[in-house]
Image (cartoon, helix red, strand yellow):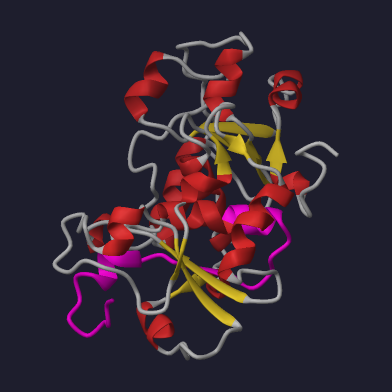
Amino acid sequence: MSKEQDYVIPDLLTDTEWLQNNLSNKDIRIVDCGYWEAYKRAHIPGAVGIPRDHYFKDPDTNRTFISNPEQFSREMTELGISNNTLVVAYDDFGSLWASRLWWVLKYYGHHSVKVLNGGWNKWLSEGKQVTGVKPHIHKTKFDPVIDKGILATAQQIMDIDRNNPEKIVFDVRSDAEYKGENDRGNKRAGHIPGAKHLEWLNFVDKENSMIFKSASEIAALLAPLGITTDKEITTYCQGGIRAAHVFFVLELLGYKKLRVYDGSFREWGNRQDTPIE
């Protein structure tokens, strides 16, 4: 069984061959989710770049929380994404930022989104066409419909019973962040008490364009943590980006009870009323 076939929801992904065959499809908006300067140098033909914040964070909250509906609607409109557009997102770092766009679109009610497995690195390694030409964007209208069920707040995290094995808080930061050895500029360092931990990079194949590992490989990594499809999982990191990536990974495997703590440790570590280990 191929890696593409053993996911429960494989349609969340697409591959370079499919995208190559659909570059001229006017109903698709390809989004390069990497850094703007890199996008300007070269990108997949027809792809638009993100000139502002490719994390889709709210500048009014010092980029702690997700873009508000008005901000996100404006950003999507400027990228030519309507409620009916099929979005194909990619980046050059293990789909980290592409997964973030996928999750923010999902939060705002848009589910017609695919992540390009292997992204820019796989596209380049196969010698496929690249360009520095920006496409003409026909601005559209995007109406956000919020799905609060996939976002967790600090209060919801504090309300979780640590003795309830059915509810898991999943820290996907680096080992140093989890152990409190790297405070990332926060006032306090460490992790949310009782959080399970495994860094997000474990879910991609670093030797193969950082494509997603197979469902069986991922499940084997999650099993020792007690992270199974019947549990309610809340992911967090420093700013909700890596957490969104792991949310995407878990959804690939058919997890249904998922949330991202979007404020993550950027909020948690800078408050005085949040417990830390």
Q: Is residue 257 magenta?
A: yes
Q: In screen coordinates, is 241 left or right of 245?
A: left
Q: Reply above or below: 44 against 212.
A: above
The C terminus is located in which quarter?
Answer: bottom left
- Residue displayed at 64% across by 13% down: 126
Segment tinted magenta in the rendering: 248-277
Say which quadrant the N terminus sits in. top right
In the rendered image, residue 137, in percent from the top left (x then y), is placed at 52, 28
Q: Position of residue 185 (x, y in %)?
A: 16, 56
| Residue at 56 percent of width and 47 percent of height | 203
Residue 158 locus on image (x, y percent): 38, 86
Residue 271 versus residue 213: which sits nearer the camera?
213
The part of the image, by quadrant, that contains residue 250 is bottom right
Q: Is residue 158 above or below residue 51?
A: below
Residue 109 part of the magenta segment: no
Residue at 26 percent across and 82 percent down: it is: 274
